[in-house]
Image: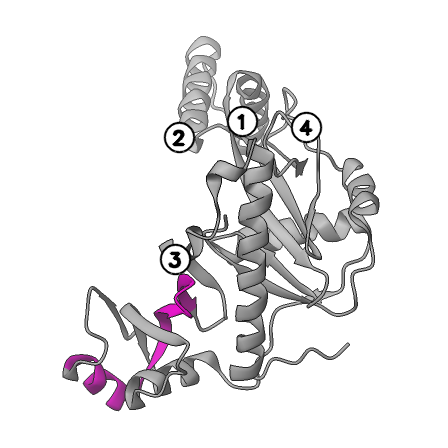
Amino acid sequence: MFKNVRLFRLEKPFDLSAFALSEQLMTRRFRPCGPLETTTLGWASPLGEDNTTLVMAVSGCLLLCARKQERLLPSSAIAEAVDERISEIETNEARNVGRAERRRLREQIISEMLPRAFTRSRRTQLYIDTETRWLMVDAASEKQAEEVVTLLRETLESLPARLPNPNRAPSTVMTDWLLTDSAPADFMAGDACELRDADDDAGVVRCRGQNLGSDEILNHLRARKLVTKLALNWNEQLDFVLANDLSLKRLQMTEALNDLNDDDAKTNAAEQLEAEFALFALQMRQLMARFETIFELSNAI
């Protein structure tokens, strides 16, 4: 399941059925890069390359998968080829190559090299919880998440979605949890955090494998550093690092939660994925409800 979560709030109910959404996604289905294309992005099956299903629907949640393919053409290789071509011209024709001609040569060389370049693909899963209007993207970076959300918006022609806007700043809440040992009973701090100076973003302290209740950590907090990332366990079900933009990293279901998923009862990979997704989505729905309360997230349409 997801290793990261980037959150987006849908500003109105999502009314498309799984079938209707799948029909829309077919218009932007993934295709490999053509000979002269540097990148392509489209929709693939969340069940894997050998499956044609573009949407998996479980308990009001719609699981999708975007696939991006890029041609690997290092800038150093292009520069070397350009230098060689320029050297040949200057030697054979006894003249200097101007700036405009250099640009044309570079474009020509890229066109020649692209069809022979290797490709790599990246798959990004995301899902829409139609009951709570949360869109969750398994992306480590904001750029990757925005790219996939933009693809979905373009595919559907409209997707009013925004980043979460908490009334209570997560960094302030997490700082208070550590400073006063006041985290809610269902949240337990782990052994990692990131602290930033309240007056200077350049002042950063990153800790791993630390007792976050130690005097060393508390002294940083008393010196007006804020917690911007915090390793947490929620309800003995999920482990993750919560950031001050409410994104989650290093997300894992705990062994206790995984034990609820009986692998022996599943006859194929699709059933196994459906069971895992149902379990994961239910926990995330409950976690988001807690976030809405703790950080005062608006759900207004």
Pointer 1 residue = 106
* C-alpha span from label 4 to label 3: 40 Å
Q: Nearer the viewer, residue 78 or 100?
A: 78
Foreground mark, 1 or 2, reads 2
In percent of the image, x 81 and y 43: which residue is there? 19
Q: Position of residue 219 (x, y in %)?
A: 19, 86
Q: Give the amino acid at mark 3.
A: Ala
Q: Give the amino acid at mark 2.
A: Ser
Q: Nearer the viewer, residue 82 or 63?
A: 63
Number of labels in the image equals 4
> Between disc 2 and disc 3, whose residue precedes?
2
* C-alpha span from label 4 to label 1: 27 Å
In percent of the image, x 56 and y 41: which residue is there? 273
Pointer 4 residue = 31
Pointer 2 residue = 76
> Between disc 1 and disc 2, whose residue precedes?
2
Q: Give the amino acid at mark 1.
A: Arg
